[in-house]
Amino acid sequence: MTALSHRAHLRAIAISAMRARGLDPEFPPDALAAVATMKTAPSATEEPVRDLRSLLWCSIDNDESRDLDQLSVAEELAGDAVTLLISVADVDALVSKGSPIDRHAAANTTSVYTPAAIFPMLPERLSTDLTSLADQQDRLSVVIECVVASDGRLKSSDVYGAVVRNRAKLAYNAVGAWLTGDGPLPDAAARVRGMDRQLKIQDRVAQALGKVRHEHGALEFASSDVEHVFDGDTLQEVRPGLPNRAKSLIENLMIAANGAVARFLDGRGFPSLRRVVRSPERWDRIRALAALTGDTLPAAADSAALAAFLAHRKEVAPDAFGDLSHTVIRLLGPGEYVVDPPGAEPPGHFGLAVRDYTHSTAPNRRYPDLITQRLIKAALAGHTSPYAIDELVRLAAHCTAQEDNANRVERQVRKSAAAMLVESRVGETFDALVTGVSPQGTFVRVATPPIEGKLMRGEHGLDVGDRVRVRLVEVNVDRGYIDFVRI
């Protein structure tokens, strides 16, 4: 029997892991049959739309991405204010509630991203074409408009339907390098007159928005992303992701847009599906970590104080900031979806330090965003909510659970990929950081190479954030196991 390539092996592991966790890696026949009948992108919708195709819209995403969910453009106003527009693909125009395609999306609730393969929430005929804000194509969209003062304060916002056209399909790496002076203007931007200035305006607004959030206590972490480098179908390397100015640009614009959408729905008397990170239950452990470096955090959880501590540690000990970031993220706990009824006090997001936050800008990839889009469109068309409160409560719990399942699958396949690369290094020793302590075991992370595994011996008395010396004793590629013992 011919041995599977690394890519095929990892894909098979991903499929098995998805099925084990209640995620379907394949589209059902009725969903594929429905897609087969769709020949063109929609050009009309019930709610009024504006024609904004003349604006200098661009997309900024991963190099290989074709499922483009959002575009952005900015227009300068008098007094140094800027009108910021975020255009979100109108997925609901082709994926109606309760349809076969929608049923599959509602079951999985998210695309699953693994090193060897992507398992999209929607069939690729939609997500990478008919419902994608594809390069040089006219597309229906939902636009979030924010007027931002020069100091980053939000002066006003609005939401409406529009038809748009992507003038330049851009990628994070190239745009990020250009913004920091480390590379040329990407060719796709250079071909569009005025796009260079447009990107500079967007970057300026994004930095101002980020500054205001951080002043209010938004937490800034080192990136925990890793990049899997393949040569054909052979995995060659796993390396840490690097900071990227363009990713920061998009992150700040999307946070502003998601806040505006949450307030829009509340102002129209509609419920919303909020994205929440609650006040951390393990605040005492975060305080203890701060005390080890001579810093003091208040007795009660305080995002502004934690943000100041993180900023200080990044300045005085940049080499250790990655490990500190990873530890604090684990102690904060995962996000979840909750329902915010009309007029209720919003639950807020501890990590982002914002009161109003939903997920609305990635309906090709996340089901909560598609739910939010249907609520927006109903409000714009003058209809009642397409979801009852109890239905939204069930969906919020289901989306949270499936996101957790998808994250576990992605982690497992990343561990399988790491196991492929280190199975020849069994017996070697490494410096490691304790990243998790639970009834399931104690887990540690090695920075170089970036791998994480379970501590099989010597775990007693350890807690998240402790540093240990470990020996790699066993790996299992199929199960994604990387096992260490404490020295």
Image (tube, rainbow, N blue to C red):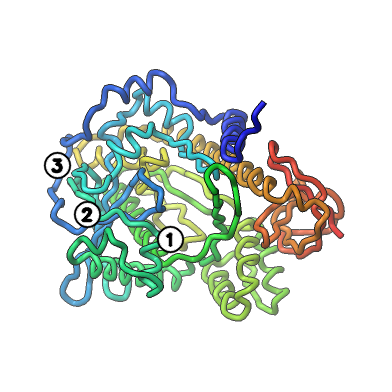
Residue type at mark 2: give it: Arg
Residue occupying the point 37% across, 57% down:
171
Give how far across and how far down residue 272 sits, in percent: 37, 44
Residue occupying the point 69% across, 41% down:
480
Name the N-terminal-most of marks 3 and 1: 3
Q: Quadrant of the C terminus?
A: bottom right
Alpha carbon separation for disc pair 2 and 1: 32 Å
Vertical placement of 377 versus 357: above or below?
Answer: above
Residue occupying the point 25% across, 40% down:
377
Read off the residue under disc 1: 354
Vertical placement of 429 versus 335: above or below?
Answer: below
Read off the residue under disc 2: 167
Read off the residue under disc 3: 48
Q: Badge 3: few (under 14), some or many (20 or more) residues near its Cα, within 10 Å?
A: few
Give how far across and how far down residue 180 sits, in percent: 39, 73
Circle 3 SS class = loop
From the viewer's perspective, is 220 left or right of 332?
left
Alpha carbon separation for disc pair 3 and 2: 23 Å
Q: Is residue 255 visible?
A: yes
Q: Which is in the foreground here, disc 3 or disc 1?
A: 3
Give how far across and how far down residue 322 sits, in percent: 61, 66
Decide which of 172, 453 is in the foreground and name it.
172
Q: Which is in the foreground here, disc 3 or disc 2?
A: 2
Name the N-terminal-most of marks 2 and 1: 2
Q: Quadrant of the N terminus?
A: top right
Circle 2 SS class = loop
Q: Is residue 278 visible?
A: no
Do the CB atoms of the residues marked 3 and 2 lie less than 8 Å apart? no
Q: Badge 2: few (under 14), some or many (20 or more) residues near its Cα, within 10 Å?
A: many
Residue type at mark 3: give it: Pro
Do the CB atoms of the residues marked 3 and 1 lie less than 8 Å apart? no
Q: Badge 1: few (under 14), some or many (20 or more) residues near its Cα, within 10 Å?
A: some
